[in-house]
Amino acid sequence: MVACTEPTELIMNVRAHEGGVNVMVRELNRACTCSIGEWPSPGDCATTSDAISCDCEPSPGNCVDQLRLRRNGEVIITNDFDARDGGQGSLAVAIADGDVVEVVGCGGVASIPLGALPTPPVPEVSGQMNGSDLEVSWTTTPPSATVLAAVSDGFGGRWCHYNGDAGTSTFNAEGVLRELRISVFGLATMVEHDTELGAAHVWRGALSSLRVDPLSR
């Protein structure tokens, strides 16, 4: 862990959902790409791998010490931040109105309120094999601002960020023998907060998932 004497400016993407909060940290003025923890902008995709690696040294978020969630002024859960996880961390806790996520370290504390976030849209998801391709379709109710669709075989995969509340995406599953997990997040409009450590982009989402056997063609 690197001790920061001056605040390091960060970009923080925060995904809040029923099961907790995920925080992905990157440093504003230091380019770095990791095999996990990348947050694709709408219209883009990112690959993931359980073999975590980054093309920079040290890993992004190396000066972050801890994540914590504060409710009614009291800290109710904390989790040490390990930059070796690709610059991402999580808090497993049910979110309540008025909660605040805090990113601690890098010369300060980023306080990120979750209380004013809109109701997340719930996706309806289907997936089927078409030859060696997995075709994933979704709609969301109420309509989502964007959708994050991910497919993984347990070792790695791809997730893509789409505009709109309905769509279809194709994932190549050539040679895949393991069961595929489909995860689709319907996301409400992103809310941006300025913090002591930089910009925090907060995405509130609802998750739907299913599993598909790639051999069921």
Image (spheres, helix red, strand yellow):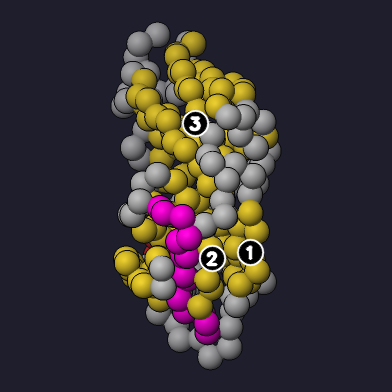
Tell me the CA gap for discs 1 and 3. Answer: 24 Å
Residue 87 in sight in this render: no
Dot 2 and dot 1 residues touching (CB under 8 Å): yes
Which mark is first along the chain, 1 or 2? 2
Residue corresponding to mark 3: 122
- Image coordinates for residue 38, horizontal then vertical, percent: 54, 52
- Which residue is painted at 37% across and 25% down in the image? 210
Which mark is first along the chain, 2 or 3? 2
Which span of residues is magenta-colored?
Answer: 95-108
Residue corresponding to mark 1: 193
Amino acid under disc 2: Ile
Report if residue 106 lies within the magenta region: yes
Q: In which quarter of the image is residue 82?
A: bottom left
Residue corresponding to mark 2: 112
Dot 2 crowding, Cα within 10 Å, few <14, some 14–19, many 20+: many
Q: In this view, does 136 lie above or below 38?
A: above
- Image coordinates for residue 117, horizontal then vertical, percent: 56, 51
Tell me the CA gap for discs 2 and 1. Answer: 7 Å
